[in-house]
Image: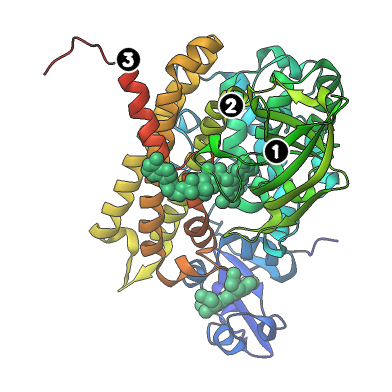
Amino acid sequence: MPKELKVFTRAEVAKHTSEDDCWIIIDSEVYDVTTFADMHPGGAQLLIEYGGKDVTDDFYGLHRQEVIVKYAPRLKIGTIENESPKIAIPKPGDLSKVPYAEPSYWMGFKSPYFNESHTKFRQALRELYADVKPEALISEELNKAPTLELYKFLGEEGVLASQIGPGPWLKGLKLPGGIKPENFDYFHEMIAHEETARVGTPGFVDGISSGYSIGLPPVFNFGPPHLKERVVPEVLLGRKRICLAITEPYTGSDVAKIRTTAKLTPDGKHFIVNGVKKWITNGTFSDYFSVAVRTEKGITMLFIERQEGLETKGIKTSYSSAAGTSYITFENVKVPVENILGKEGQGFQVIMYNFNHERWYICCSIIASTRMIIEECMKWANQRKVFGKRLIDQPVIRAKIGAMISSLEPVQNWLENITYQMCNMPYLEQSQKLAGPIALLKYQATRVAHNVSDDACQIFGGRGITKTGMGRSIESFQRTYKFAAILGGSEEIMSDLGVRQAMKYFPKNARL
Ligand SMILES: Cc1cc2nc3c(=O)[nH]c(=O)nc-3n(C[C@H](O)[C@H](O)[C@H](O)COP(=O)(O)OP(=O)(O)OC[C@H]3O[C@@H](n4cnc5c(N)ncnc54)[C@H](O)[C@@H]3O)c2cc1C
Ligand code: HEM
């Protein structure tokens, strides 16, 4: 039963100052911390020294708001007479009101791209992820893979389906916010990636989104009908997990050099696969694998089910093992020839077909994560007092935040422009025109993340490199933003590809 709250005067609260009877005021609300003091992670004595006082500023200088949200039901005993709280405690699922914390359309600016259905979709996902977040935080911390139950929940709610783009595979599926599959566009998908990233647990987030969003497209775009009919619904409803296995210890950027072999059996009915794959996201718990192999005719993509001879083991990286990052060994794995994705020897085209979408999706995620870091910096700089002033009152800190915002907004706007092209260009035109811009956007988005991470760490000081407390998200970001700068094509490869693509269209008769 909820406690009955009483009304006190400040003078009454001021009498409760001893270790046997200690009250404090935070934002016009009264907390009895007598029994809590001994358990207080910051120390009992310190809390008692503050007994009877209004500690609002001190509290917010040292604790994230989630601390008071968690402890209020146990410790709050009343409110201060004729006063009401001044600090907003957002409800789970609320959009942020902090400037630049949301893309501009959601902060009241006009946009040619978005409509009511995008707002409904974002709201539904934000609320849904508010329920998932507690589990995400625990899994991230304990290196635990997302459970199959969670996958099934995300599948049934249409969250998985909303991260692989519009297409016939959405037919008949429920989507968040009640969006009809035929009205679903790449802006909805962009929002899906942004909201997933906002959960703020990078390893876990890759655990619930990275494997299938790159592993399933080769099946629905190039798979034979028998595989499409069975595998696509199983994965989209969260009953089975799939990943994409291209990279090997010998070769990453240079995909054409892969060494995993697939030899045809004498009866021509099966391939026998041998080789190793490295860093395969979601591999530790996947049932299915879209795998690049080398046959007599060249690079070929195969759909392979978990079976004897296929072993996966975890690889520890800078983020949580919740992502299921794996090393895979194939030892005489038998695969029916009907499991070729696309045509034998044409696997390189299948891989390239996937890349634009994968890189665009990485841009959506890293830009949203960077925006969250800016929000954290704005809040922290507003509440942390040093040398008797808020950090935000220091010109040097304002200059850092100014640099962050003014570097993020252009990449968000470029992302939205490219997303508009994806909504309006047929596939062939997209592959001719968008590979370069997407690669350059990815390059710039991860350069921005790098600079924002660096400045954010400085603004948070020691807390920016501490895993718990106020700087938790900053620490996690500075440890993990590099994933986006390497996966799906590293920065060096992205800028090079962008310029090479541009030079393809350079007019032969142009001169300085
Ligand atoms: C956590 C994690 C998850 C991953 N998930 C997957 C997955 O699910 N599936 C999958 O198939 N792969 C996955 N990868 C592999 C990833 O795609 C590769 O790491 C990436 O392509 C780079 O390859 P590499 O690490 O072998 O670097 P290399 O190719 O060895 O390159 C090393 C460095 O040299 C630079 N470089 C390379 N060539 C050039 C050049 N021509 N000019 C200038 N600089 C160059 C690169 O930019 C890079 O920084 C994952 C990797 C990690 C770390
Ligand atoms: C309702 C009242 C309070 C509750 C529920 C509370 C709870 C907590 C919790 C959970 C932590 C650990 C935070 C983390 O590492 O994430 C913490 C740390 C701390 N608390 Fe409190 N606290 C309260 C009031 C206060 C007050 C009034 C002070 C003194 C101004 C204080 C000073 C500290 C300090 C110094 C730390 C350590 C911070 C750090 O490691 O940087 N707390 N508190």
Q: Earlier in the sequence, mark 1 or mark 2?
A: 1
On the image, which quarter does residue 115 sit in? top right
Considering the numbered disc 2 on the image, is that residue within a helix, a strand or a loop?
helix
Q: Position of residue 303 (x, y in %)?
A: 77, 31
Q: Position of residue 3 (x, y in %)?
A: 79, 65
Which mark, by number, is residue 261? Answer: 1
- Residue 6 appears in view: no
What crowding class fits label 3: few (fewer than 14 Cα within 10 Å), some (14-19), or many (20 or more)?
A: few
Q: Position of residue 285 (x, y in %)?
A: 79, 48
Is the C-beta of the residue carrying label 2 under 8 Å from the nearest atom of ligand 1?
Answer: no
Considering the numbered disc 1 on the image, is that residue within a helix, a strand or a loop?
strand
Q: Which residue is mark 2?
A: 348
Q: Spatial distance from mark 3 to mark 1, Cα to Cα?
A: 37 Å
Residue type at mark 1 is Thr
Which mark, by number, is residue 505? Answer: 3
Q: Is the residue 241 above or below the residue 162 in the image? A: below
Q: Nearer the viewer, residue 336 or 42?
A: 336
Q: Nearer the viewer, residue 455 or 335?
A: 335
Residue type at mark 3 is Tyr
Query: Which residue appears farthest toward the left when viewing the image?
Result: 512
